[in-house]
Amino acid sequence: MEPDIVVTLRAAGCVFAEDEAALLVASADGPAGLAAMVARRCAGIPLEHVLGWAEFGGHRIVVEDGVFVPRRRTEFLVELATGLARRAVADGGAAAVRPVVVDLCCGSGALGAVVATRLGAAGAGIEREDASPSPSPSPSLALARPVPRPRPVPSDPERAATPPPTRQVELHAADIDGAAVRCARRNVVPVGGQVHEGDLYDALPAELRGRVDILIANVPYVPTREIDLMPPEARVYEPLVALDGGPDGLDVLRRVLAGAGAWLVPGGRLLVETSVDQASIAVDVAGRYGLTASVERSEEHEATVLVVASPLMRRGGTAAT
């Protein structure tokens, strides 16, 4: 460890300077590269953007500049989605052959990639991290949506883009932001998925209508008036489209709920991260579209997830198969 780097990072306001210095040293390509990385971090650029990756769900996710950094709290949504997909397979139904998973507002594609990897065969999927303890989270991004700092490992981060595909699930991811789509392809394509660019459901192939078993959406849900209160790492360096949820934070969620019934299989599930304050309103909105919703809360992750079920019978009397 270079003590000068720790001093420099601490002077720039990095509370966990020792942990961050270790990550930068482990990831740098020579002295010049290390100096450039330290300079970027001291300028306030999120550590994950400086490193080019983030740890999420025990896996290393490629994160490029200008792309939303996956937060630790969203791992709870991934756990719920994986469990529901496994239950659908065990119960027989439409998902028994090969469940269809869609990741809307995908950002880096972290959610879909980790769900697909967990549903796939052992050994398939994106790079798995070791079991050593994580460094403490950055206090700045933690104020928005906590994310543990990635752990230094000797392997090349680019290995995250070249694992064997996961064939036990059909995965599609979509985002309106071109930078996010390009980044997501580095995480989603290696696990056998596809990434589409466009506005919510408009981005998806038409043949997916009525076939989606698990729909996950980490929609923006910060009320517009609160954006200026977010830490600079999020407010300045992450895309506004991934943060701003409109006047009450629910604009995008309403649109997702409005279209979900047409894309989900009968009995399919939609999972959306939200806040405690927004949860009851979100349940009411889901009901207006003929969807049944419940709220799951994890104190460990400090996360709230809306879990929505489509009707077991479609309009016109078509039952789930």
Image (cartoon, rainbow, N blue to C red):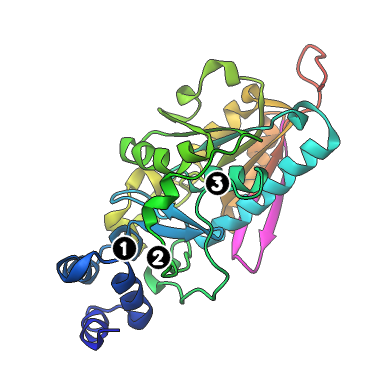
Q: Amino acid at mark 2?
A: Leu
Identify the image quadrant of the N terminus.
bottom left
Tell me, yes or no, if residue 19 can be seen here: yes
Considering every residue shown, the one lying at the far left of the view is 32
**Camera-nearest label, 3 or 2:** 3
- x and y percent of residue 172 in the render? 53, 32
Q: Reading the chain from its start, which is encountered first: label 1 or label 3?
A: 1
Give the SS element for disc 2. helix
**Cβ–Cβ under 8 Å for marks 1 and 2:** yes
Residue 275 found in image quarter: bottom right
Q: Position of residue 291 (x, y in %)?
A: 71, 33
Q: CA distance from mark 1 to mark 2?
A: 8 Å
Quarter holding residue 229:
bottom left
Residue to which mark 1 is pinned: 46
Please tell me whether residue 157 is drawn above or below residue 36 in the rendered image.
above
Of marks 1 and 2, which one's residue comes earlier in the chain? 1
Residue 72 placement (x, y as % from top left)? 52, 62
Task: Give how far apart the Cα atoms at labels 3 and 2 are.
Answer: 27 Å
The answer to whether residue 43 shows anywhere in this view is no
Relative to residue 178, is residue 290 drawn left or right? right
- The quadrant of the picture occupied by the C terminus is top right
Inspect the image, locate mark 1, and give the three-letter code of the amino acid beneath it: Pro
Specify the label residue 125 is tagged with.
3
Q: Which residues are magenta?
A: 291-305
SS for dot 3: loop
Residue 141 circle label: 2
